[in-house]
Image (cartoon, helix red, strand yellow):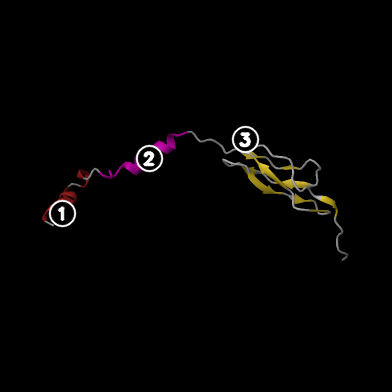
Amino acid sequence: MRRRRSEIARRERDPAADHSQPKDTALAWRRAESALPTVPPVVCPAETDEAGHAIFFATIAGEAPINVLGTCESTYGGTPYRLCHPNGTWSATQLPCTGARQLPDR
């Protein structure tokens, strides 16, 4: 117990004596991080599918392909999807929008 108290007293007198966590570590990391060049993210651009009936919004690519749902034109139905690949390219459309959907009478 006596040893513990003397260690605490020493730290109170000289906080820098505790080298397990220097006070300026966080500041040094922030400086190092700010010096790193920033790289813009890889993006799969917004585009319509091959048939022109679905739109896929721009999507930030990940480390693995990302499944992205598209939106069919108002007169078409379905749940189209594509993969946004890590290099920023799209796969072919799967489950493309189909035929003209009947709109309800108003």
Residue 100, position as x, y percentages in the image: 86, 53
The segment highlighted magenta reads 20-36
Residue drawn at (16%, 51%) of the image: 7
Query: Residue 28 bears which disc, if any?
Result: none
- Tell me, for residue 29, which label it has, or none: 2
Question: In the rendering, at what x and y percent does residue 53 appear?
Answer: 80, 47
> Seen in the image, is 59 located left or right of residue 4?
right
Q: Is residue 10 within the magenta segment?
A: no
The residue closer to the viewer here, 59 or 28, is: 59
Q: Residue at x 69, y 46 (%)?
A: 57
Mark 2 vs mark 1, CA separation in Å = 31 Å
Mark 1 sits on what residue?
A: 4
Give the number of the mark in front: 3 or 2: 3
Q: Which residue is mark 3?
A: 87
**SS class, disc 2:** helix
The span from disc 3 to disc 2 (Cα, nearest Å) is 30 Å
Corner quadrant of residue 86: top right
Which of marks 1 and 2 precedes in the sequence?
A: 1
Q: Amino acid at mark 2?
A: Trp
Mark 2 and mark 1 residues within 8 Å of each other at the beta carbon: no
Q: Residues within 10 Å of mark 2 (few under 14, many from 20)?
A: few
Instruction: Indicate the amino acid at tag 1.
Output: Arg
Q: Main secondary structure of the magenta part?
A: helix
